[in-house]
Image: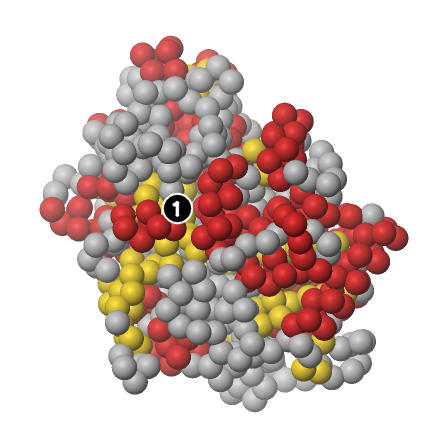
Amino acid sequence: MTHQTTCCYCGVGCGIVVKQEQNGRLSLEGDTQHPSSKGMLCSKGMNLHYTVMDQSDRLLYPQMRLNRSMPMQRVSWEAALERTAAVFRTFIQKYGPDSVAFYVSGQCLTEEYYLVNKLIKGFIGSNNIDTNSRLCMSSAVVGYKLSLGEDSVPVCYDDIDEADLFFVEGANPAWCHPILWRRIEARKAANPNVKIICIDPRKTDTARSADLHLPLRPGTDIVLNNAIGRLLIERNYIDNEFITNHADGFLAYQEQVRQRSIEEAADICGVSVDAIRTAAEWIGRSKGFLSLWTMGLNQSVIGVNKNLSLINLHLITGRIGKPGNGPFSLTGQPNAMGGRETGGLANSLPAHRDVTNAAHRAEVEAFWNSPVKIAAKPGLTATEMVEALADDRLKAIWIINTNPLVSLPDVNAAEKALKKARFVVVQDVSNRADTVQFADVVLPAAAWLEKEGTMTNAERRITYLPKVLDAPGEALPDAEIIWRFAQKMGFGADFTYANASEVYEEYTRITAGTNVDVTGVSHALLRTKRTIQWPYPAQSEGSGIGETGTKRLFTDHRFYTPNQRAQIHAVPDENTSEPIDEDFPLVLTTGRIRDQWHTMTKTGRVAKLNQHSAQPVLQIHPEDARVRNIEEGQLVEVRGRRGHVRVKAQLTEDVRVGLCFLPMHWGKMPAGAPGISTLNRANNLTNSLVDPRSKEPDFKFSAVEVVAYRKP
Ligand code: SF4
């Protein structure tokens, strides 16, 4: 038997064909029919089946305990959900609906996202639901909203085949979005005029392949983008027709970018004037200008403004809504986009509606037939949940398919907060999640291939994932866990579904008439067509939208803002990250390595993937190492204002002087790991500063010092 599905790692969303032999063995290969990946898979995707074949650490049945000093006891689903509902009801009655929260994941399927949102926003009456996508793409969401009017990625992967200038800023797709990168490499191989510019303080594999690498100082992206904007204006590479007819804000922008000379900008960024001039010239001369970015721009205390400064380059040159042109924020998770569509953030409602918009709330309340008013105030975001647990404003938290005790910033504070929480529910696939140890109730969830639903990848492409295997033990699909819980809470009439297809059908109806209209999509249609790019309203076929949806947005240059004009924003360029000083003179940046994904709860189980890098290492420049008497391979202590990490040092000129890098994947090492401390979480060192609008943390800039570690 063969089954077409999609990879559940990164936001590229590659198609996979899973083969199931009669003896139950699984194998897989790339799906040549999937338009996003055309049969290609990276090392992570090629080994994905091992994560479901190895059941050694699976959670198999519900467990609970009456207090944290007791061991977990196996219980029935009935008992686990009954108790959870009783505790939630008690807190809600005593302290109000904002005393409970859900923290979910960009790995959740669209149907699951939709149901949790409906439950807490429309029936419990709180907006306290946030997703770990808050940690990776919320700055791009706000950037798109402010500039284009809505959170809408305007481009598609086929634009790669039409672009001749790739501007990759704060991203390492060669490692983190490998199949997208292979498509860029193929484009470059086919056309020698194609150029790649990489903006990154580190010399990554992407930077090594680029025609021009600008290793800027961390936090200076806006200065650089504004300098490029200034040169594009001075050299008359702007599109006056587009600016006049389709954009606001150009004059203020022009004024802003003139405030720094190119020489001053080069000095601040730590790159050459020539490099900035070359970048601007290549952009100006190109026919297809595609910019790609991820965490280097998003995970910043000025992340929204970084996004705006890059989108501005497209707006002043009119390079948007045309083949091969546009700003393209890559998503790190397989269904970060689906979560955005269903309103999976603390400030949003389904189909890109806002909780602060009274008309939007009224539409959704009417659709859901809500017994409560949807709260007008945004709920707690990821880091705000930690603060609220710490000071007891938040009493109960339900964590679904995410591992915040590795992934949240200032993770020691998060750990203390979770210890203090009065009630913690952990719903997950395996006991690898570091959160399980702090749970009062543990709910076993079905894994990839064990449940059906949909995901949307970074190019707005929806793919159906069929159920291929039965979940082991008593594990249930996440959607079913949520609807069963809602029934226990007394909302049974509105949470009765036979399957995930019914949930999806309901979700599509709530999108009617919006810019993310998918009323023409259903599980049945996706099984036939394989994928569809939103929007795809009912009767799309033959309407000009295209058989498989909408490839590009804004082709008519009418944007989703109230006046249908794009907004160019003059943004300040100062970085407001935590200061470096004599005690903590180095900047630490964190990120991914090639063969691991997030907190390793899946990739860490695959022997082949662990071979690439068995332990985390600190990359530090040889000059910074020399003055600290640190040698290659030596155990070092990285000290910050909030904690420390002990890892081996790797001396490399791939990082700038003054910068060091740690991978973000590792949690608590298994006891007895050779020559290394049990604590090696990069997020021991990161801080809880967030962008004021997106609430995305400043993972890319923490002040640290590094010293050779000697046992006391
Ligand atoms: Fe999976 Fe991303 Fe690799 Fe594609 S590029 S196979 S989606 S991890």
Q: Is residue 393 left or right of residue 130?
A: right
To which quarter of the image does residue 407 belong? bottom right
Q: Which residue is mark 1?
A: 522
> Image point 43% across, 34% down: which residue?
517
Position of the C terminus, as image quadrant, is bottom right
Total numbered labels: 1
> Image point 27% across, 34% down: which residue?
541
Residue 492, above or below 669: above
Residue 164, above or below 16: above
Q: Amino acid at mark 1?
A: Ser
Residue 114, above or below 85: above
Residue 244 visible in the displayed image: yes
> Image point 17% across, 46% down: which residue?
188
Q: Is residue 160 left or right of residue 661?
A: left
x, y percent for residue 536:
36, 36
Q: Is residue 294 left or right of residue 401?
A: left
